[in-house]
Amino acid sequence: MQRIAQVARLRPELREEYLTLHSAVWPGVEAALHAAHIRNYSIFLHGDLLFAYYEYLGEDFAADLETIKADPETQRWWTFTDPCQEPWPDSATGSRWVDLPEIWHLSDPESPSKAEQP
């Protein structure tokens, strides 16, 4: 499993629109995420900072991301959500989200942590 965390900025003037959209995410968008082996997707908000976290359970992350990008329902969803987000200066071209490096993780007590592994 791969854990992904990202940040984006929410345009203050479109805050209510973004929150309304995410109060009822379209079933087709959720289905595309599930089909791409994405689970436990959450978006949190602090002021105008969006923080997203999800887990990837597939074998080919790049290919699964491409299937999401090619999904017509997701493309339509993004026509509503993308204008609500302001890209960070270091966002990848065409992206509004910046990936965050994981610096620490507390695993389940039954799973040895990286520090405990030989």
Image (cartoon, rainbow, N blue to C red):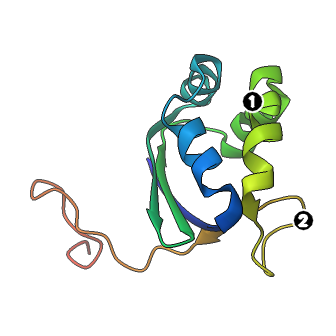
Residue 74: assigned label: 1
Quadrant that contains the C terminus: bottom left
How far, Cα to Cα, is label 1 from label 2?
19 Å
Q: Which of marks 1 and 2 is in front?
A: 1
Which residue lies at the image location 58% right of the left edge and 50% below the top edge?
Answer: 16
The foreground one among 37 and 13 is: 13
Q: Identify the element where label 2 is drawn.
A: loop
Give percent across and percent down for residue 79: 83, 39
Which residue lies at the image location 55% right of the left edge and 71% below the top edge?
Answer: 49
Does residue 97 appear in this view?
Answer: no
Which residue lies at the image location 76% right of the left edge and 22% below the top edge?
Answer: 73
Kind of residue sitting beneath label 2: Thr
Number of marks? 2
Does residue 42 appear in this view?
Answer: yes
Vertically, is 33 above or below 27? Answer: below
The reply, left or right, for residue 117 in relation to residue 60 is left
Kind of residue sitting beneath label 1: Thr
State the image quarter where residue 9 is shown.
bottom right
The foreground one among 62 and 40 is: 40
Vertically, is 49 above or below 44? Answer: below
Q: Mark 2 points at which residue?
A: 93
Packing grade of label 1 (10 A; few <14, some 14-19, many >=20) is: some
Packing grade of label 2 (10 A; few <14, some 14-19, many >=20) is: few
Give percent across and percent down for residue 14: 69, 56
Give percent across and percent down for residue 101: 54, 75
The reply, left or right, for residue 118 in relation to residue 77 is left
Which residue lies at the image location 74% right of the left edge and 29% below the top edge?
Answer: 74
The tag earlier along the polypeptide, 1 or 2, is 1
Give percent across and percent down for residue 27: 57, 18
State the image quarter where residue 96 is shown.
bottom right
The foreground one among 92 and 78 is: 78
State the image quarter where residue 92 is shown.
bottom right
